[in-house]
């Protein structure tokens, strides 16, 4: 196991390990599968009853809001099991200057990772299949953008960072060391996004977020970087859509 003092990184230690991390992953999968089955049954019964159809934007909003379920496994196998506070999941303070510096630098690395991957794909003559843009599904106009920003740049980053960086990463680290923990947690983080062409840059982003947690000992830089990344994507998509509409596209 690598000694954190040799790396210059702050130690983030928790009492749970890889076993609890595995339990957390399995619980998260079971939760989402269960919700999916229940949702499917409700949707089927709704259609059989010939009730008015539910608008797509409401369905998308509910789906994104369900990301909050990712908070449950970390709490069950972390603070609840070991009688700790939410601070054990990374909600602790850190020097403001360090948080600001790590957030800005981390966000810059994230942008470079995305740009670099696009250049690599272009150089190889491969088509970059990006994640579908869900913005239009949140609703029309500024209201749709605000809902997308709330669910995609507030709820999702907090839930995902608590699960992957606040719970899974330090649990794996306590069992396997920080290098293996960063690699495995970042790989899972990338794979669950489900789009093969963007797995490499998302994996790098996962590494950046884990390192930001190590450097500061706080989850806030990772949450801020993740939130800024998602917000930039939504705002860019909105600006492009508005500009295209004004040009008659």
Image: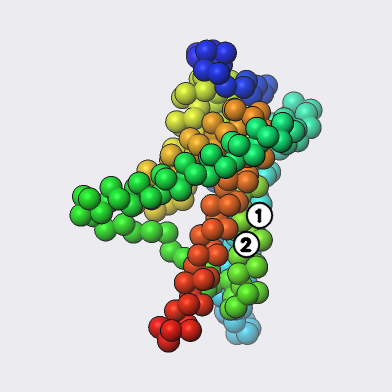
Q: How is the image coloured?
A: rainbow
Label located before the other in sequence (2 or 1): 2
Q: Position of residue 232 (x, y in %)?
A: 54, 58
Q: Nearer the viewer, residue 141 or 27?
A: 141
As drawn, the residue found furthest toward the left would be 125
Spatial distance from mark 2 to mark 1, Cα to Cα? Answer: 7 Å
Is 50 drawn above or below residue 192 in the view shown?
below
Question: Which residue does the image show at 58% across and 52% down from the upper left?
Answer: 228
Q: Which residue in the structure is indicated by mark 1?
A: 154
Question: Which residue does the image show at 66% across and 28% down from the upper left?
Answer: 217
Mark 2 touches mark 1? (CB < 8 Å): yes
> Callout 1 environment at 10 Å: few (<14), some (14 to 19), or many (20+)?
some
Residue 104, located in which quarter of the rendered image? top right
Q: Is residue 203 visible?
A: yes
Q: Which residue in the structure is indicated by mark 2?
A: 149
Question: Which residue does the image show at 42% across and 87% down from the upper left?
Answer: 248
> Callout 2 environment at 10 Å: few (<14), some (14 to 19), or many (20+)?
many
Q: Position of residue 59 (x, y in %)?
A: 59, 70
Is 43 drawn above or below residue 52 in the view shown?
above
Left-right relation of 196 to 176: left
Q: Position of residue 102 (x, y in %)?
A: 59, 36
- Secondary structure at badge 1 equals helix
Question: Which residue does the image show at 66% across and 61% down from the upper left?
Answer: 150
The quadrant of the picture occupied by the C terminus is: bottom left
Mark seen at residue 235 = none
Q: Is residue 26 visible?
A: no
Q: Nearer the viewer, residue 36 or 87?
A: 87
- Secondary structure at badge 2 equals helix
Is 40 drawn above or below residue 30 in the view shown?
below
């Amino acid at each position: 196991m690598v000694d954190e003092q040799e790396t210059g990184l702050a130690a983030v230690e928790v009492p749970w390990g890889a076993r609890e991390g595995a339990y957390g992953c399995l619980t998260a999968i079971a939760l989402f599968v269960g919700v999916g089955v229940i949702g499917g049954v409700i949707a089927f019964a709704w259609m059989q009853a010939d009730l008015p159809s539910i608008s797509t934007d409401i369905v998308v909003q509910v789906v994104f809001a369900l990301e909050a379920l990712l908070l449950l496994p970390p709490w069950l196998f972390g603070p609840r099991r070991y009688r700790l506070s939410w601070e054990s999941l990374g909600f602790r303070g850190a020097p403001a200057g360090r948080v600001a510096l790590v957030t800005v630098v981390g966000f810059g690395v994230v942008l470079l990772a995305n740009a670099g991957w696009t250049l690599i794909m272009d150089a190889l003559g491969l088509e970059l299949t990006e994640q579908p843009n869900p913005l239009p599904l949140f609703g029309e106009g500024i209201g749709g953008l605000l809902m997308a920003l709330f669910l995609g740049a507030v709820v999702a980053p907090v839930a995902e960072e608590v699960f992957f960086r606040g719970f899974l990463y330090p649990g794996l680290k306590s069992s396997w060391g920080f290098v293996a923990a960063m690699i495995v947690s970042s790989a899972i983080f990338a794979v669950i996004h489900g789009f093969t062409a963007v797995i490499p840059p998302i994996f790098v982003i996962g590494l950046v977020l884990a390192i930001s947690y190590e450097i500061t000992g706080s989850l806030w830089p990772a949450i801020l970087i993740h939130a800024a990344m998602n917000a930039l994507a939504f705002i860019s998509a909105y600006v492009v859509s508005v500009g295209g509409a004004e040009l008659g596209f």
